[in-house]
Amino acid sequence: MTDDERYMSLALSEARKALAADEIPVGCVIVCANQVVGRGYNLTQTLSDVTAHAEMQAITAAAETLGGKYLTECTLYVTLEPCVMCAGAIGWAQISRLVYGASDPKRGYTVFAPKALHPKCQVVQGVAEEECSTLIQQFFQSKRS
């Protein structure tokens, strides 16, 4: 198992916490120097806050842990491609690497704002894509039933 797969499995654990709370199951962890410094999952329903995405929760936690707003030596792992808002926050935080599982052709940043990330940010997509996609798809199928 690669480091990316290992950390994405932690992000999937966060996504399952969202699912248990009847939230859209998106989870995120931020890693710096092989340590998880921030984690979060979608809390938009729980907090009645449209900005309470997994990435936003994790970025806030990582900044608190590291004592600063710039996360330049960090990798953010998230189960779903970030939306425009989250991509902007990832860019402002100067996160150096983004790893995501499932693509989001309806809301993902690559469709609407492909330049939102910091120019030096490296992106890896498709890590544990099938598991990440299945979790989201099953959630929405259960809502339609």
Image: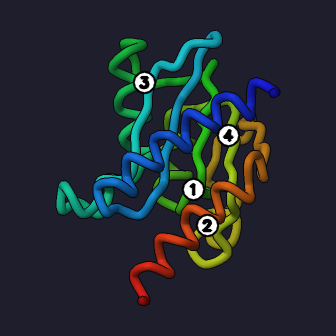
> What residue sits right under mark 2 in the picture?
108
Disc nearer the start of the sequence (2/1): 1
Would you say the residues marked 3 and 2 are in contact, meaning their CB atoms lie under 8 Å apart? Answer: no
What is the spatial separation of the Cα atoms under label 1 and label 3, in whole angstroms? 17 Å
Would you say the residues marked 4 and 3 are in contact, meaning their CB atoms lie under 8 Å apart? Answer: no
Disc nearer the start of the sequence (4/1): 1
Question: What residue lies at 33% left-to-right and 20% top-to-bottom?
Answer: 64
- Residue 111 in the image: state x and y as whole percent: 68, 72
What is the spatial separation of the Cα atoms under label 3 and label 2, in whole angstroms? 23 Å
Report the amino acid beneath label 1: Pro
Element under disc 1: loop
> What residue sits right under mark 3 in the picture?
62
Report the amino acid beneath label 3: Ala
Question: What residue lies at 37% left-to-right and 15% top-to-bottom?
Answer: 65
Disc nearer the start of the sequence (3/2): 3
Element under disc 3: helix
Q: How crowded is mark 4: few (under 14 residues within 10 Å), some or many (20 or more)?
A: many
Query: Which of 22 and 35 lies nearest the eye of the viewer?
Result: 22
Relative to 28, does residue 138 appear above or below in the rendering? below
Question: What residue lies at 76% left-to-right and 43% top-to-bottom?
Answer: 123
Relative to 64, does residue 40 appear above or below in the rendering? below
Quarter of the figure with residue 38: top left
Quarter of the figure with residue 23: bottom left
Would you say the residues marked 2 and 1 are in contact, meaning their CB atoms lie under 8 Å apart? Answer: yes
Report the amino acid beneath label 4: Leu
Disc nearer the start of the sequence (4/3): 3
Q: In which quarter of the image is the C terminus?
A: bottom left
Report the amino acid beneath label 2: Gly
Relative to 86, does residue 24 appear above or below in the rendering? below
> What residue sits right under mark 1 in the picture?
82
What is the spatial separation of the Cα atoms under label 4 and label 1, in whole angstroms? 9 Å
